[in-house]
Image (tube, helix red, strand yellow):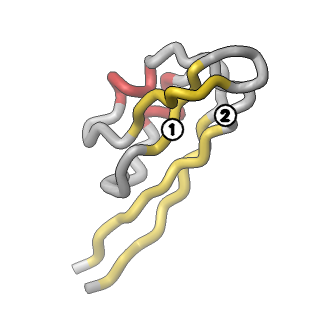
Amino acid sequence: MAKIKGSIVIDTEKCKGCEVCLAACPLNCIGIAKEVNGKGYHYAITINDECIGCANCAIVCPDGVITVYKAKITA
């Protein structure tokens, strides 16, 4: 049975830390960094590897700074 494994890449310099992606993630894979980016915002970060590649975070991101990748894993 194949399982989908996802991963996200966040453009941390463009992220404004609005936290909309946090609410959209069904597996709580995203958090907010304690550090700030060049514009002074606490940006979104990946906090675990449970991502299934649903892309909810990328869909709701108002600034389009999240890219989602998917891979099929066979067991």
* Residue at far front of view: 35
Residue 17 at x, y percent in the picture? 55, 18
Amino acid type at image mark 1: Ile
Q: Where is residue 23 in the image (x, y as percent from the top left)?
A: 33, 22
Residue 12: mark in rendering = 2
* Category of crowding for the residue at label 1, using alpha-carbon neighbours closer than 10 angstroms: few (below 14), some (14–19), many (at least 20): many
- Mark 2 is on which residue type? Thr
Is residue 62 depicted above or below 31 in this figure?
A: above
Q: Position of residue 66 (x, y in %)?
A: 60, 37
In the rendered structure, are the residues bearing label 1 and label 2 in contact, judged by CB atoms less than 8 Å apart?
Answer: yes
Does residue 65 sit above or below 8 in this rendering?
above
Write down the quadrant of residue 65 in the picture: top right
Between 50 and 61, the residue placed more toward the observer is: 50
x and y percentages locating residue 34 in the rendered image: 50, 27
List the residue tagged with mark 1.
Answer: 45
Q: How much space separates mark 1 and mark 2, taking CA atoms?
A: 8 Å
